[in-house]
Image (tube, rainbow, N blue to C red):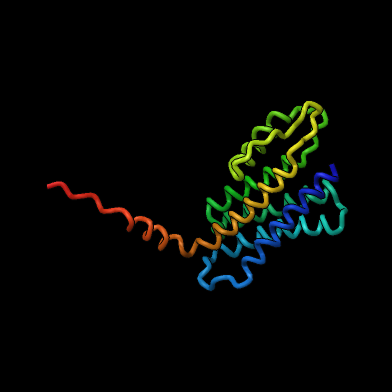
Amino acid sequence: MKKSILALCLIVLLAGGTAAAMDDDPAPEQAAGAKAGYALLDKLTGTFKQLAETGSGGRAALEKAMGDIITEARQARAQKQIDPVFFWKFNRLMTIIQLAVVEDPKGILSPLIDREVGGFVEEVTGEKVMLSGKDGKGGGLGAIAGALAYEILNLRIYLDTLPKREAMLQDFYSKFPAPAKEK
């Protein structure tokens, strides 16, 4: 279990580093709500970075950090510092991380984990994975970690485009002719 948490930490850490490198010079027109979103993503990747670097803490440290982060996300949503779309996607990300590291020695949660985590991986990467083998051990940790990394990047891209979204929509709609008025 500790190995799976550590592997997950390393992959999420890489995603955070890649995303941070892409965001060296944030646009001044970033929406105010994006700041809270970036802070949540940074805290999430920072948590994984700390766990990966120290190699300590394990499940207890991860669960406490995850609880603190989701509490912050709920407060940010209640204060309208993040929008509902970001919150839903971030909450799902947190749920998948929790399901990916849950201990289930008897395999009772395997159908739920396979459905939810497998669906997430397939939705994000287009790759269908078999998460639990006949022995109850997961075989798709790399696929899960890769999907989590992509989703963290997707959330950063979502935040990056918030201020430009209205102009992008107008540009998109301008490519279609207006419907002819009936006489």
Q: Residue furthest front?
A: 127
Which residue is at the front of the view, 74 or 31?
31
Residue occupying the point 66% across, 58% down: 41
| Residue 16 % position (x, y) | 69, 59
How many numbered badges does the structure rendering display?
A: 0
Identified at 81% across, 27% down, the residue is 135
Residue 49, percent from left and from top: 78, 58
Residue 173 in the figure: left or right of residue 76 = left
Residue 37 sits in quarter: bottom right
Describe residue 79's horizontal placement relative to residue 148 as left or right: left
Relative to 31, is 129 above or below? above
178 left or right of 16 in image:
left
Quadrant containing the N terminus in the rendered view: top right
Given residues 5 and 34, the one toward you in this image is 5
Q: In this view, does 113 lie above or below 147?
A: above
Vertically, is 136 above or below 94? Answer: above
The residue at 60%/73% (across/down) is 25
Horizontal and vertical percent position of residue 129: 67, 36
Residue 34 spot, x, y in % from top left:
56, 63
Q: Which of 129 and 111 is in front in this view?
A: 129
